Amino acid sequence: MAKEMERIRELRAEVFGGVKRAALGFYPTPLHKLERLSAELGVELYIKRDDLSGMSLFGGNKVRKLQFILGRAQAMGCTAVFTYGATQSNHAMQTATACRRLGLKPVLYLVALVKPDEADLRANLLLDRILGAEVHIVEQLPGESEEDAEERSFAMAREHMRDLEEVGMRCCEVPMGGADAAGSAAFAEGYLELCGQLAALDKQADFLFHAAGTGGTLAGLVAGRALLKAAGLPGGETDIVSINVSEKDRDAYHRKCATLSCEALAWLGRPERVEPEDIHTDARYFAPGYEKPNPAATEAIRRLARTEGLLLDPVYTGKAFAGMLDHIARGEVPKGATVVFLHTGGTTALFAEREILGPI
Ligand SMILES: *Cc1c(COP(=O)(O)O)cnc(C)c1O
């Protein structure tokens, strides 16, 4: 597959060569086979290590997106970066880290889905404080939905941005999860990076499993697949299975992700398109809810740790990995298939509040 490898490399240079990017992370992230677990499961299982993206020990999928998002912010002359998430948001912590790396001021508006103990800060919120990010915690009001609390956090941040702009600061807003056209475009590149690595091993993936939250990663992966498919290259036919980590209206989510995919392709100046039917999500594995542990995810974390010495997290990758194991056990993934698990990071949650970690 040396020829395919070369053609993927050329396509990648053509599509992404002109993107302004911030110097963040260490790419390509490693891809390696899980030999012991593959033998147990009867598939060829590989893991793509976006958890090892850097910059600190606590990397993850948001760093890839932030290369493009903050590259654009720097080009626009921004000095302060505002973003959102839950108090234990991986995205917020990775954004704070990236801002420090680039000399930008990080401002985080975080909704307290799980109430932090100010006297005993944990995991990402502790890291946010060490990084000196300006943290605004937005408490969920009695009877207020998660979405309403998020909307309120956006409104508070926008007022704050207006105040700073009045005194001459240039602020930029990064949406929750970095789920915008630039962030998703970065995962289209990530998908080409992965398919190039597989081609170098003379492989292509039948299935790619990953955890889906805001949908930015999903949108990017599917956009990358559309690029390869249009070029007739390996990876164009992979079944990308996105395991939801929170409750979504399925049709609306598929439409939203397809739109984001198209926006990413348009941002790259490409004619390819993605339709809602191209998206394959599975919502069977996140119960009882976001940041709420379940036994299958707990077991998946233990299993990967004990067969391969690798760590997953209870909020995202543990649930996605449990979903993948179930697809394999049910025969939805046939024996002998080549399967890739995209490790998106998040392992700081192993040191989060007990409510998030569960009885592991
Ligand atoms: C944010 C995140 C995801 C989901 O990515 P989206 O682009 O928001 O769908 C998956 N895994 C981890 C560990 C994350 O932090």
Image: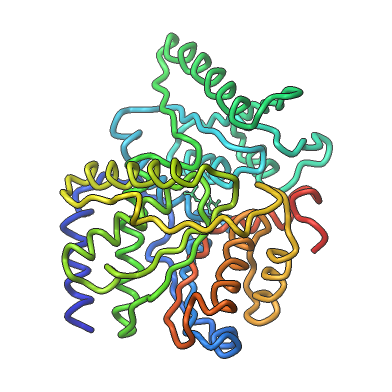
Relative to 247, say whether 189 is above or below. below
Q: Residue 7, located in which quarter of the rendered image? A: bottom left
Task: Residue 176: give x, y in percent of width and height.
Answer: 50, 37
Q: State the residue in front, 338 or 354.
A: 338
Relative to 152, say whether 37 is above or below. below
Task: Residue 208: give x, y in percent of width and height.
Answer: 43, 68
Horizontal relation, residue 184 to residue 20: left or right: right
Task: Residue 86: give x, y in percent of width and height.
Answer: 63, 38
Residue at left offset 29%, top offset 58%: 224
Horizontal relation, residue 360 to residue 136: left or right: right
Residue at left offset 60%, top offset 88%: 40
How many marks the image carries: the answer is 0
Q: Residue 107, located in which quarter of the rendered image? A: top right
Which quadrant: the N terminus? bottom left
Task: Residue 277: give x, y in percent of width and height.
Answer: 34, 54
Relative to 164, say whether 104 is above or below. below
Q: State the residue in front, 334 or 183.
A: 334
Residue at left offset 43%, top offset 9%: 166
Which quadrant: the C terminus? bottom right
Q: State the residue in front, 273 or 110.
A: 273
Q: How is the image coloured?
A: rainbow
Residue at left offset 24%, top offset 42%: 267
